[in-house]
Image (cartoon, helix red, strand yellow):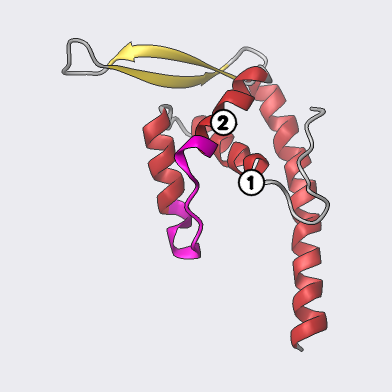
Amino acid sequence: MSEQISSGFLIKQRAFLKLYLITLIENKYLYGLKLRDLLKDEFKELGFQPKHPEIYKALHDLMEQGIIYQRKEKKQGTVYQEVVYYHFTDEGREKASAYKKLLKHELDRCIHLLQKAVKDNFY
């Protein structure tokens, strides 16, 4: 993954969203609106509400990286409405695992930066 995940201080929002999207897809929450709703609920009490376009940009990045693909299916109980489901490609799980390891290292770095800032400035 040659993508830049850090802005030098904290990780970029899209990298953060991609991490959560990978985990949600691993847990079988497979379509866009469901993913969006789960992310909004997950972070609501922390004051972070990821925007709809950012979530889809993150999903598109994952598709471009060959981690996931989308498949349209008819929505149950409807004749014409389709829902876009996201699935891992054959190589996607391995790529997703590597991406998550990279993000874990970067998140640990960010945690240490924030802990240092709190310790140095508030205690």
Using a 10 Å C-alpha cutoff, classify the residue at mark 1 as few (fewer than 14 neighbours), some (14 to 19) or many (20 or more): some
Residue that badge 2 annotates: 57
**Magenta-span inclusion, residue 52:** yes
Task: Give the image location of residue 67, x and y in percent.
Answer: 64, 21
* Type of amino acid under label 2: Lys
Residue that badge 1 annotates: 13
The magenta-colored residue range is 42-54
Task: Give the image location of residue 117, x and y in percent.
Answer: 79, 74
Secondary structure beneath dot 2 equals: helix
Using a 10 Å C-alpha cutoff, classify the residue at mark 2 as few (fewer than 14 neighbours), some (14 to 19) or many (20 or more): some
Q: Is residue 45 above or below residue 88?
A: below
Q: Nearer the viewer, residue 107 or 49?
A: 49
Query: Total marks drawn?
Result: 2
Magenta span: predominant SS is helix
Task: Give the image location of residue 74, x and y in percent.
Answer: 28, 12
Q: Is residue 56 above or below residue 86?
A: below
Please report whichever mark, 1 or 2, sits nearer to the chain's N-terminal start: 1
Q: Residue furthest front?
A: 53
On the rendered structure, is 37 left or right of 70? left
On the rendered structure, is 95 left or right of 22? right
Task: Give the image location of residue 7, x and y in percent.
Answer: 78, 48
Q: Which quadrant of the view contains residue 35?
A: top left
Which quadrant of the figure contains the N terminus? top right
**Magenta-span inclusion, residue 6:** no
Q: Residue at x 76, y 71 (%)?
A: 115
The reply to whether the C-beta atoms of the residues labelled 1 and 2 are less than 8 Å apart is no
Which quadrant of the figure contains the C terminus? bottom right
Secondary structure beneath dot 1 equals: helix
Q: Residue at x 44, y 12 (%)?
A: 71
Calculate the distance from the C-alpha at mark 1 to the C-alpha at mark 2.
11 Å
